[in-house]
Image (spheres, grey):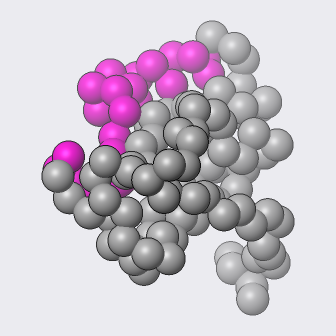
Amino acid sequence: EEAAGRRVFLSEAQLIVADPCAEGQGWHLENAGGPGLTVFVPLSNIAADRGPQSVLPGTHHLSDGSLGLRERLRLCLKALCATHGAVASAAAPDRTWAAGDALVLDGR
């Protein structure tokens, strides 16, 4: 498919296991190699005690090689302060992340 004159392609697919005995996933950067989209779509319901996926808004600026380090940190901290830190994919801590819901992270 064409999007805004550019070809869209899948560069990586991952499976995240959210079973009761699955290991937790630590904080990490998505799209560290450059701008891109990350799409999370749970294939089954994920209970609040197994997730939900959390994001740190603004951290995509950290891998923007077109900006100096000071500007990358400023933009990242500005976004984190505006959201008071991590943002969960489910609106409330007792909510289930339903199968078929989507979380899209735009790393541009």
Whether the magenta-drawn stretch holds residue 77 is answered as yes
Q: Which residue is drawn at 43% across and 53% down?
A: 20
Describe residue 108's horizontal placement relative to residue 81 as left or right: right
Q: Which residue is drawn at 72% across and 32% down?
A: 63
Describe residue 5's horizontal placement relative to residue 54 as left or right: right
The answer to whether residue 104 is seen in the rendering is no
Q: Residue 49, relative to residue 13: is it above or below?
A: above
Whether the magenta-drawn stretch holds residue 101 is answered as no
The answer to whether residue 74 is seen in the rendering is yes
Query: In this view of the protein, which residue sits in the foreground, 61 or 19?
Result: 19
Query: In this view of the protein, which residue sits in the foreground, 100 or 108?
Result: 100
Q: Which residue is drawn at 45% across and 19% down?
A: 77
Q: Position of residue 93 (x, y in %)?
A: 20, 46
Q: Where is residue 67 in the image (x, y as percent from the top left)?
A: 71, 25
Residue 5 is drawn in which quadrant? bottom right
Query: In this view of the protein, which residue sits in the foreground, 25 or 86?
Result: 25
- In magenta, the rendered stretch is 71-93
- View extreme (front): residue: 21
Q: In which quadrant is the N terminus drawn?
A: bottom right
Q: Residue 30, relative to residue 89: is it above or below?
A: above
- View extreme (bottom): residue: 1
Q: Where is residue 46 in the image (x, y as percent from the top left)?
A: 37, 63
Q: Position of residue 18 (x, y in %)?
A: 49, 57
Q: Residue at x 66, y 44 (%)?
A: 30
Q: Residue 83, relative to residue 69: is it above or below?
A: below
Count of marks, rendered view: 0
